Image: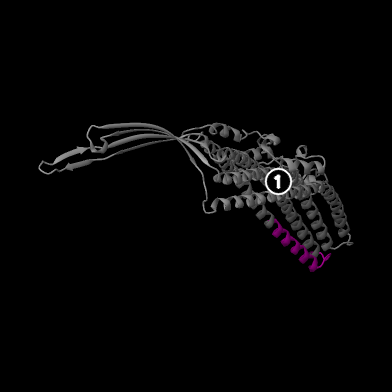
């Protein structure tokens, strides 16, 4: 996985105060073979089962349109029947007469609905709203997959760096313990100093084991989200170019572009049409029915034939259906009201997330500068305490505390630089602009309109466009 030699070199850079990024804690044998965050996100975009199942759900929703358009199309039914018939006729003074026949019938019925209370056009419009809503849900799924993948990528970088820092700290503490034991042998320090050094080493080893466990967890999540094990991860930068320059602009864009808001609005449209569709059941229905029929051996008469053709218009006027439709209309209106409130709630939730992520992203820059200053100061302090301890002005505990303070400052710096990159992705997601296209990923982007165009006008056929 990650080479420790590169990590040691990076730690040396840290110790001379040249830390430019937490990501620079990683050394790689070959830059050409390094995995970039764009490459990892491309794999996640193509591999993600969650994204692929949502694409399938969107394709399934596309079929609502041809189903609704079926209301404009005729229904054609072929009927047939065949049987055996035996007749025996007996008259007084005459011999019985027996006839055997095979009555058969074949008919073709074509029915076209001319009017049904505008349920068909409203169903078509509803299906279009449902399709648009499904696309927004797909876009939200894409955003979540990319944001989670970016977080997993940065978590591996951070946890590997933290593990290297902890292991380096264990090496330093082990050396400190040896020096303390040597000084104890010559009477410069007491057994208490040795015990303090031993305690610090044990605590450092426990922290290293914890860091190793955290890294294993991050590696597993990376594999789950991106589909491959991480190898030679390259540094990553915040995606500042996709982030609006002002908070007000970010909020305004989110209320217009965020898929959660758009999905809620399309749901409002779909439920408004659902109320109209239900109410359409109270309107008259006008049908036109054409029938062609041919019968053989009619009424048991062998070799007889009868043919007919008819074209009949009919109208059905509902008078009272027990109040079921009226209840359905009222229920649909309540569901519409709920959807409108949910749309308002979605706007407020999106606004809240944008403001929160904006603050987190902006503050990480200040946090990074503060942590850099803390690292520089901790390094100077540690060097000073070590020198003072050599002449007896500082105790072993002072040196250990200074060493721990430097370790904490370095871990904080690594964490804050990870947070800056992750927060940039989360902020872009909350605005509604995190997509494979905007990130410029080297993938074949999924276009939901292709399947939509393939099925919207299909009159017949069992196979899906991909051949299933």
Q: Nearer the viewer, residue 423 or 168?
A: 423
Identify the colour scheme used.
one colour
Range shown magenta: 185-208
Considering only vertical position in the picture, is 49 above or below 203?
A: above
Q: Nearer the viewer, residue 353 or 94?
A: 94
Give residue 206's quadrant in the image.
bottom right
Callout 1 crowding tier (Cα within 10 Å): few <14, some 14–19, many ≥20: many
Residue 230 in sight: no
Residue 445 in sight: yes
Give residue 129's quadrant in the image.
top right
Residue situated furthest bottom in the rendering = 191
Which residue is tagged 1? 154
Prevailing SS of the magenta stretch: helix
How far across and down, in percent of the image, does residue 94 sit? Answer: 10, 41
How far across and down, in percent of the image, does residue 153 sit? Answer: 68, 45
Q: Nearer the viewer, residue 271 or 109?
A: 109
Q: Total of numbered circles in the picture?
A: 1
Q: Is residue 82 magenta?
A: no
Q: Determine whether, in the image, residue 57 is placed left or right of residue 205.
A: left
Q: Determine whether, in the image, residue 70 is placed left or right of residue 406.
A: left
Residue situated furthest front in the rendering = 92
Q: Residue at x 56, y 34 (%)?
A: 451
Q: Residue at x 65, y 33 (%)?
A: 442
How far across and down, in percent of the image, does residue 441 sit? Answer: 67, 35
Give the quarter of the figure containing the N terminus: top right
How far across and down, in percent of the image, does residue 390 sit? Answer: 86, 58
**Mark 1 secondary-structure assignment:** helix
């Amino acid at each position: 996985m990650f080479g420790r030699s590169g990590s040691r070199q990076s730690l040396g850079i840290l110790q001379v105060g040249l830390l430019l990024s937490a990501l620079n804690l990683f050394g790689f044998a070959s830059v050409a073979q390094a995995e970039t965050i764009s490459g990892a996100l491309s794999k996640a975009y193509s591999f993600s089962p969650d994204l692929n199942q949502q694409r399938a759900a969107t394709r399934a929703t596309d079929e609502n349109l041809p189903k609704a358009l079926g209301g404009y199309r005729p229904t054609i039914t072929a009927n047939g029947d065949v049987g055996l018939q035996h007749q025996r006729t007996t008259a007084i003074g005459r011999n019985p007469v027996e006839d055997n026949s095979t009555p058969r019938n074949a008919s073709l019925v074509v029915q076209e609905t001319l009017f049904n209370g505008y349920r068909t056009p409203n169903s078509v419009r509803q299906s279009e709203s449902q399709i648009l809503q499904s696309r927004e849900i797909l876009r939200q799924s894409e955003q979540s997959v990319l944001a989670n993948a970016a977080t997993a990528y940065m978590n591996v970088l951070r946890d590997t760096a933290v593990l290297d820092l902890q292991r380096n700290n264990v090496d330093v503490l082990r050396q400190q313990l040896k020096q303390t034991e040597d000084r104890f042998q010559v009477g410069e320090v007491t057994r208490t100093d040795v015990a303090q050094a031993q305690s610090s080493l044990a605590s450092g080893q426990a922290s290293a084991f914890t860091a190793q466990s955290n890294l294993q967890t991050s590696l597993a999540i990376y594999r789950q989200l991106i589909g491959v094990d991480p190898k030679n991860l390259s540094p990553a930068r915040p995606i500042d170019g996709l982030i609006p320059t002002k908070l007000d602009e970010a909020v305004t864009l989110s209320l217009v572009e965020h898929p959660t808001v758009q999905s809620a609005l399309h749901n409002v449209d779909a439920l408004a049409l659902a109320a109209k569709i239900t109410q359409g059941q109270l309107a008259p229905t006008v049908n036109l029915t054409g029938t062609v029929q041919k019968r053989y051996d009619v009424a048991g008469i062998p070799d007889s034939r009868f043919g007919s053709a008819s074209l009949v218009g009919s109208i059905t006027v509902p008078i009272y259906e027990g109040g079921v439709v009226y209840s359905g209309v009222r229920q649909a209106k309540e569901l519409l009201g709920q959807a409108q409130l949910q749309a308002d709630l979605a706007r407020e939730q999106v606004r809240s997330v944008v403001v929160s992520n904006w603050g987190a992203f902006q503050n990480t820059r200040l946090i990074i500068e503060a942590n850099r200053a803390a690292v520089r100061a901790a390094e100077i302090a540690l060097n000073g305490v070590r020198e003072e301890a050599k002449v007896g002005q500082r105790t072993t505990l002072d040196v250990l505390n200074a060493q721990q303070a430097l370790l904490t400052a370095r871990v904080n710096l690594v964490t804050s630089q990870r947070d800056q990159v992750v927060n940039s992705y989360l902020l872009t997601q909350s605005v509604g602009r995190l997509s494979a296209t905007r990130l410029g990923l080297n993938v074949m982007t999924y276009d939901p309109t292709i399947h939509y165009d393939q099925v919207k006008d299909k009159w017949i056929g069992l196979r899906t466009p991909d051949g299933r």
